[in-house]
Image (tube, rainbow, N blue to C red):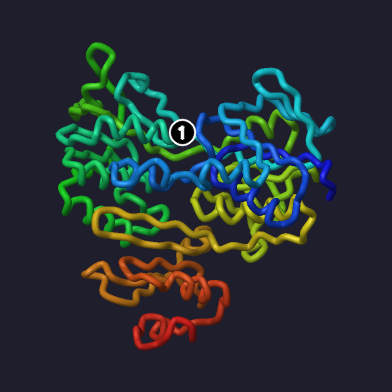
Amino acid sequence: MTSQENFIIVGGGLAGASAAEALRAGGFEGRIRLFAGERHHPYIRPPLSKDYLSGKDAIDTVFVHPHDWYDEHGVEVGTGSVVASLDPAARNLTLADGERVGYDALLLATGSTPRRLSIAGADLDGVHYLRTIDDSEALRAELKDGGKRLVLIGSGWIGMEVAATARTLGNDVTILEREAIPLSAALGDELGTMFAELHLEHGVVLRRRVVVDSIVGAGGRVTAVVLAGGESIAADLVLVGIGAVPNVELATAAGLETDNGVLTDAALRTSDERIFAAGDVANAFHPVIGQRLRSEHWANALGSGAAAGRSMLGQSVSYDDIPYFYTDQFDLGMEYSGYGPLTKGATVVYRGDRAKREFIAFWVADGRVVAGMNVNVWGVNEAVQGIIRRANAVDPARLADESVALESL
């Protein structure tokens, strides 16, 4: 490395900011330019469906660093700077305003975009998606005073968190779900049912096994969601939460290898040795389980961004963090750590009081713990991750026994 080198970060989220921090911490003295497509400095997204959406937290709490941190560390942030194209052969990129910028190494941290609903009425005023600060503020403006009828299409993590926040603010909430049990794809039927019951207890209406046909309105504003079969559900606003797609357009057009994200090795290097990828957009090879994982969660943006920064410095990197996410809904808080692809068909072992929703759940496959989730039990995530990482053969009875220290398993 020399002070003349030019490193570029494309993307203004947590992954990009974490990479910039790792570059400076690793001794990089060259130029760092971070292009953020939004008008904001890099920020974290979990509060957008929880405390920032509710109005409990101020906007300053969502930013990764104070704004002056970037000047102090010599990181040039271009807000509202959209990268139009990337030329790996020439090692440069072109911004939407026509400026051409060269690089010695480049990180793609372009994130993901909410999957759009392609039905009649999806473009009506009052139909929302949630990904950005601006999205959260628009949604909060409608929900903050309560008394609104919110209909959520989809029951993933963001949808369920918004449902809890909106209900706490005094709004009527209806969730429309294609499947029989929300969150079952991530947690299985039993634990998905726990979340469904939690929402029902707090007055959320949960409609399962339904298909949305269209959204209707009056004067350009949404008034109802129509189900297949003709039933109409009144709505003052609608939130669509049917998943997200990685923003691979820039990489694909540049000839990089993509498949459900930008493909990288364990060092987060793409098919071009000078280009790296991190965060939501990276479909990275995980050295522990021997397969690719793409994670859209906060912890992955934090960890993979930092790892990519070290890799850009030429350090030996093998990104092997255990995937982690958390949620807060009503009076239930949980942390989940583990390898989702390995939980299919696994046995779930419980430790604690399931009736009170104070327990740890372990997914056991081939005699080893591959995932764990602590529900309203705190200070144990590190120990749960230790069990997963050690990959020891476990006795389910000892796993369930609260008198047995987690660190001994």
| Left or right for 345, reference 17 | left
- From the top left corner, tell me how far across and down residue 252 is, in percent: 68, 32
* Viewer-proximal residue among 291 and 295: 295
Q: Is residue 398 above or below residue 104?
A: below
Q: Residue at x 71, y 55 (%)?
A: 310
| Crowding at mark 1 (Cα within 10 Å: few <14, some 14-19, many 20+) | some
- From the top left corner, tell me how far across and down residue 92 is, in percent: 78, 30
> Dot 1 lies on which element?
loop
Q: Residue at x 37, y 55 (%)?
A: 327
- Residue 352: quarter of image: bottom left
**Count of residue discs:** 1
Name the residue tied to disc 1. 115
Residue 54 can be seen, yes or no: yes
- Residue 273: quarter of image: top right
Q: Is residue 400 above or below residue 158?
A: below
* Viewer-proximal residue among 219 and 122: 219
- From the top left corner, tell me how far across and down residue 219 is, in percent: 24, 11
Residue 259 can be seen, yes or no: no
- Residue 311: quarter of image: bottom right
| Left or right for 198, reference 361 | left
* Viewer-proximal residue among 46 and 209: 46
Q: Is residue 30 above or below residue 191?
A: above
What residue type is disc 1 on? Arg
